[in-house]
Image (cartoon, rainbow, N blue to C red):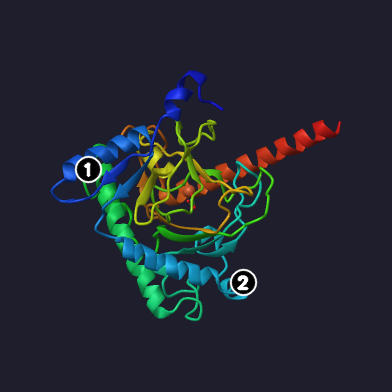
Amino acid sequence: MNIPSETKSSIKSRTIPKISLHNFSERKEEIGKQIINAAENVGFFALVNQESPSPVEIEEIFEISRKFFSLPKEVKAKTPLIKTENAGWEHKSQIRPSTGTPDQKESLQLQSHRRHDYSWPDDDALSPEEKDKMQAFMRSSHKLSMEILSFFAVALGFPEDYFRRAHQVDLPDAQNTLRLLHYHNIEGTEYPSTYWRAGAHSDFDCLTLLYQRTGEDGLEVCPGREAHTSFAQGDSWTPVEPITGEIVCNIGDMMMAWSDDRFKSLFHRVRCPKVGENQKARYSIAYFNQANKNIMVTGPKGKYPRMTAHQYILDAVARNFRQLESSGEMAKMNSAQRAA
Ligand SMILES: O=C(O)CCC(=O)C(=O)O
Ligand SMILES: [Fe+2]
């Protein structure tokens, strides 16, 4: 808990700004200012009234997601998660350093440039039409992401298309990923407090677009992170209201580093609801913008060493792993002390 107590009360009152994209081309300057303000001061914001992806398109993708996750395990397991590639299906396998327990969820990760390789499900799991819809959705999420990243580029003193050139999803070294998430219906089950649908974490990427559905709540964010390398978490969590059609955006660690810690990457988590709360299934969809492997991550002020986006992700994974190991050690020490 590295947040001084005197700042906690002001942090607590923070809300997630809603930014309307209505009449985007005429209102670009105003929208850009709102986005940069949110990126600097909050780290999370919700986009509303966007032209694309439309609420209808988003709902269609949720429908395909629900259908995929309802398939038998053996079918989904034909495309197992390739951890080093961030592609494929996993089930209750992701352990966050903050919890030490597996997230209570399953997810499928897809990358545009791999559409025709072994990492995408077979036609019996996702039909060719469904795959086309998925890819079109990735394209519209990408287009919107690049509009947002162009505001970041200008604010940091880079050319407007700087981040667009850094995220080229058709190249073989692309790292952008669409993740379909399914948190199971757990009605009537009381999980211990150490279990989370998604344990507290920050994203490794530059920018995440998150789609949620009205009523399927649980996402919470923790404001107040000062350096992208820290694991510090405060104890004041703000719920993010899920609304179908809105797009929750958050800054990831790679952008926090790239902006010399100016844009904030916040810890966030998804609660495991208790008996008496809404324990029905939650579905969400995340589009992660991660610069291509060969792109150099280098902030305008050079606060952090220059490195490729590939190395950046490898280091972030290693940092997570070290933290997981040391928190495992802490847990062992705690239980040894309790036993003594
Ligand atoms: O499902 C959610 O709302 C959050 C998912 C998330 O944070 C992630 O996959 O990184
Ligand atoms: Fe996340």
Q: Which one is in front, 14 or 157?
A: 14
Determine the secondary structure under disc 1. helix
Q: Farthest residue toward the right?
A: 340
Question: Which quarter shows the N terminus?
Answer: top right
Identify residue for label 1: 31
Q: Please indicate, yes or no, whether residue 170 appears anywhere in the rendered image.
A: no
Identified at 76% across, 38% down, the residue is 332
Cα distance in 3D space between marks 2 and 1: 44 Å
As drawn, is 259 to the left or to the right of 110?
Answer: left
Q: Position of residue 247 (x, y in %)?
A: 35, 52
Q: Position of residue 339 (x, y in %)?
A: 85, 34
Pointer 2 residue Cβ closer than 8 Å to ligand 1: no
| Mark 1 neighbour density, 10 Å: few (under 14) some (14–19) many (20 or more) | many
Q: Residue at x 51, y 21 (%)?
A: 4
Res. 74 image quadrant: bottom right
Please report whichever mark, 2 or 1, sits nearer to the chain's N-terminal start: 1
Q: What amino acid type is highlighted by mark number 2? A: Lys
Determine crowd level at label 2: few under 14, some 14-19, many 20+ residues with C-alpha closer than 10 A: few
Instruction: Classify residue 244 by image quadrant.
Output: bottom left
Say which residue label 2 marks.
73
| Rendered residue at 60%/41% (across/down) | 98
User: Residue 182, position in %: x, y?
Assistant: 53, 60
Q: Secondary structure at mark 2?
A: helix
**Rendered location of residue 316, percent (x, y):** 51, 45
Looking at this view, is 48 or 131 the one in front? 48
